[in-house]
Amino acid sequence: MTEFTVKPIRRRKSIQLLLGFSFIATIGGVLAPIIAYLIPRENAAAYGGPSEVGAPEDFPLNSGKIVSVNDKPVIIVNTKAGGLKAFSAICTHLGCVVTWNERKGIIHSPCHDGLFNPVNGSVISGPPPRPLPQYELVVKEGKVLVGKPLGNIYGERSGE
Ligand code: FES
């Protein structure tokens, strides 16, 4: 007789516990990515100071060379009009890595023929919606040092 009165209560509590756990797990699963999106991340590639990318003679006049700065491709260009400059090598259209077009003396995104000015990174033609962000660059004690980007790199959230 006592078995009939105890078993339904245990089953009901078990079901309530299971439903409660499921509810909390579902809410947690929904909220966790939203919270992770809203909280600003620590800069994933924490800036550890300027990166040495070579000597000035590694970047002769009228050249462009891709280097890695904090695991991001950066193009170092050297032109008569602009001197030594560093720009993000990630195209602002869809993120292709740009190249140096030696014949034209400009930065070229090969995916959709985007062309960029090597003096200021502005778009010359093609679909890119904005200029290539420039990086800080200094020549110090015979070394070319590239610092922080001065704009938002393609694929990174703005405001970080
Ligand atoms: S990705 Fe550069 S032009 Fe499309």
Image (cartoon, rainbow, N blue to C red):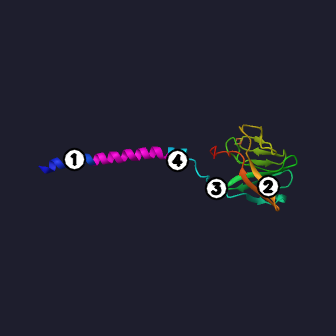
- Start-end of magenta stretch: 14-33
Tag 4, which secondary structure?
helix
Work out how far the residue at label 4 is from the one at label 1, CA to CA, in angstroms.
40 Å
Tag 1, which secondary structure?
helix
Q: Residues within 10 Å of mark 3 (few under 14, many from 20)?
A: few
Q: Which residue is mark 4?
A: 36
Percent x, y for residue 26? 41, 45
Q: Earlier in the sequence, mark 3 or mark 2?
A: 3
Q: Which residue is mark 2?
A: 138
- Dots 4, 1 in contact, CB < 8 A: no
Q: Which residue is mark 1?
A: 9
Work out how far the residue at label 4 is from the one at label 2, CA to CA, in angstroms.
36 Å
Residue 10 included in the magenta stretch of the image: no
Q: Residues within 10 Å of mark 4 (few under 14, many from 20)?
A: few
Work out how far the residue at label 3 is from the one at label 2, CA to CA, in angstroms.
20 Å
Tag 3, which secondary structure?
loop
> What amino acid is at disc 2?
Val
Q: Which residue is mark 3?
A: 46
In percent of the image, x 83 and y 58: which residue is there?
56
> What amino acid is at disc 4?
Ala
